[in-house]
Amino acid sequence: MSKNVGGRNPLHLFVCHLEWRSKRNLAAYQELVAALDDRDREIRDLAQVLLRRSSPRPQVAERTVETAEVAGRIRRIENDLQAGCGSTG
């Protein structure tokens, strides 16, 4: 379903995003911030997008192609999570 990229798992970062967004879990936020310095560019990009999506600030209207690609990856992870939650075993 997901793979470790760099040293972090993209699915773990997404769960941190949900924890921060819904419960304001400080440890989850710190994990996302730490991922901004990951050695893997994809993990850094994902962390940046997830933090931006959690931000109370208004979203920037313009998005780069690169950000759109990362957003597409996030949608695929969300779909995978929803499909996995609906499975019976």
Image: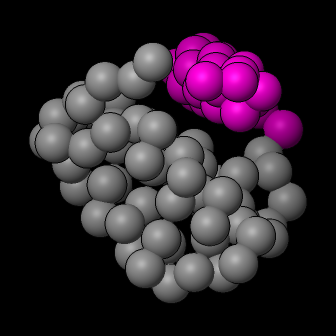
In x, y percent, where is residue 53?
A: 71, 52
Residue farthest along the front direction in this orientation: 89
In x, y percent, where is residue 52?
A: 64, 54
Observer able to see residue 75: no
State whether the magenta stretch is mostly helix, strand or loop: helix
**Which quadrant of the rendered structure holds the C terminus?**
top right
In x, y percent, where is residue 14?
A: 54, 46
**In the figure, residue 30 lies in which quadrant?**
bottom left
| Foreground of the two, 89 or 66 | 89
Residue at 32 percent across and 39 percent down: it is 9
Q: Does residue 76 belong to the magenta stretch?
A: yes
Compared to residue 89, the image places residue 34 above or below, namely: below
In x, y percent, where is residue 4?
A: 25, 31
Horizontal side, residue 48 vs residue 69: left or right: left
What count of labels does the image hold? 0
Residue at 40 percent across and 23 percent down: it is 2
Residue at 78 percent across and 46 percent down: it is 60
Which residues are the magenta region? 61-89
